[in-house]
Image (cartoon, rainbow, N blue to C red):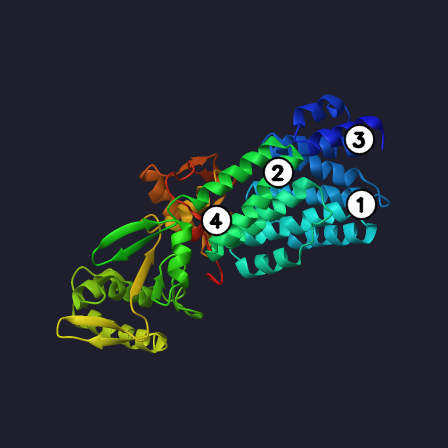
Amino acid sequence: MDSSIAAAGRALRAGDPLGAFQVVALRDDPAALALRGIAMAQLGELGRARELLRRAARGFGPREALSRARCLAAEAEVALAARDLAWPRPALADALRTFLERGDRENAAHVRLLQIRQLLLLGRVDEADAACAALDVGAAPARIVAVAALATFEVALRRGRAAEARAALARARHAALRSGIGALCAEVEQAGRALVLPAARLVSAAGTRPLTLDEVGAVLASPDLVIDGCRRTARQGARVVRLSRRPALFALLCGLAEAWPGEVGRDHLIERAFGALRTNASYRARLRVGMGRLRRAMRPFAGIRATAGGFRLVVRGATHVRLLAPPIDSPDATLLALLADGEAWSTSALALALGSSQRTVQRALADLEVAGQVRALGRGRSRRWLCAPAAGFATTLLLPASAGLG
């Protein structure tokens, strides 16, 4: 490696892309193209960065597998920043295998962190948690340690574990300061805001009040029956019933929990679960069927008793019923939470992250655009969507999760 390539690499590791450009801007060899691509990525020119990295990967010969793997890892990181969640995971696995075979532990740890970040964006929290637990960054540079701690921090937030999240944030802050990279320090401080912003709302017949993540953790750890609207689960202690794939049943359960210990009328439940403004015999039959299914699902925790005016939730063993609702009251709250990271998302990436169809996402975005909550950049296949970071509440518990809180 010549001195100019080494100098540009040191500048990029220190978070100085302009300094790297000054050294390799006029060179077109594969190593220089790769460094220019990384510099472009640090400056936010993601499309140009991916083009340069691909040119660099094609330029390396068959004996330069390690350099080609580094280009693949860099392109994968740029793809994540561009929210290209469909970027081929096998290619990243091949790069990891090359790093391990050649003894490049630093880049191997970096690739594992990219895989964890991709899992988190896709809502696969269980897999990300297991990968974080298996990751060893004890001898890694400070920037790798900081990124690993941020990944652990996000997993803890998704789980509602405030104490674990604070410990991970402290590790990330300490490592970021040691790295001397200003952008990384700013990312850590931005992440820490989620600990003090409202993360959910506690809803009852008496009213609604916001909760921080610490308060959410206290509610989840209580012996009460908790109806978690952020993850669409019912839980009491270690027992959990997941209703994320049964929205009508969960809507009925939320109506019962909101009115507890009182009863809720049949017309209100029909409107809440089925969206019907007027009831008829068909909707009343659907309500009876839904209540029967909900009784079976909730049997470990509570009973549902029919009354003259409607239905009432009867708890077993718990002293209270607590209903946690998302921090914002919007049918598109999860979509807004994804866009609130400030990155430009394609509709295909949003659909992949939400586990929904692309057409459903397009319709939701059109409604939000009319309401002035999101805006589009570009046209056709290059169109991307973004909104300003959501102010005043934490989006973490709104983000998609395939397995819910643990």
Q: How many residues crowd mark 3 within 10 Å: few (<14), some (14–19), many (20+)?
A: few
Return the mark for residue 66.
1
Q: Can you see residue 360?
A: no
User: What's the residue type where badge 4 is placed?
Assistant: Leu
Q: Is residue 367 left or right of residue 176?
A: left
Classify mark 1: helix, strand or loop.
Answer: helix
Query: In this figure, which residue is indicated by the disc labeled 3?
Result: 6
Classify mark 4: helix, strand or loop.
Answer: helix
Tally of marks: 4
Return the mark for residue 51.
none
Q: Is residue 249 left or right of residue 155?
A: left
Q: How many residues crowd mark 2 within 10 Å: few (<14), some (14–19), many (20+)?
A: many
Q: How many residues crowd mark 4 within 10 Å: few (<14), some (14–19), many (20+)?
A: many
247 relative to 52, above or below: below
Query: In this figure, which residue is indicated by the disc labeled 2?
Result: 176
275 relative to 392, above or below: below
Classify mark 3: helix, strand or loop.
Answer: helix
Query: In this figure, which residue is indicated by the disc labeled 4?
Result: 350
Q: Nearer the viewer, residue 136 or 10?
A: 136
For the residues labelled 3 and 4, the Cα–Cα distance comes to 38 Å
Q: Nearer the viewer, mark 1 or mark 2?
A: 2
Q: Earlier in the sequence, mark 1 or mark 2?
A: 1
User: What's the residue type where badge 2 is placed?
Assistant: Ala
Q: Position of residue 354 (x, y in %)?
A: 46, 54
Q: Position of residue 163 (x, y in %)?
A: 49, 53
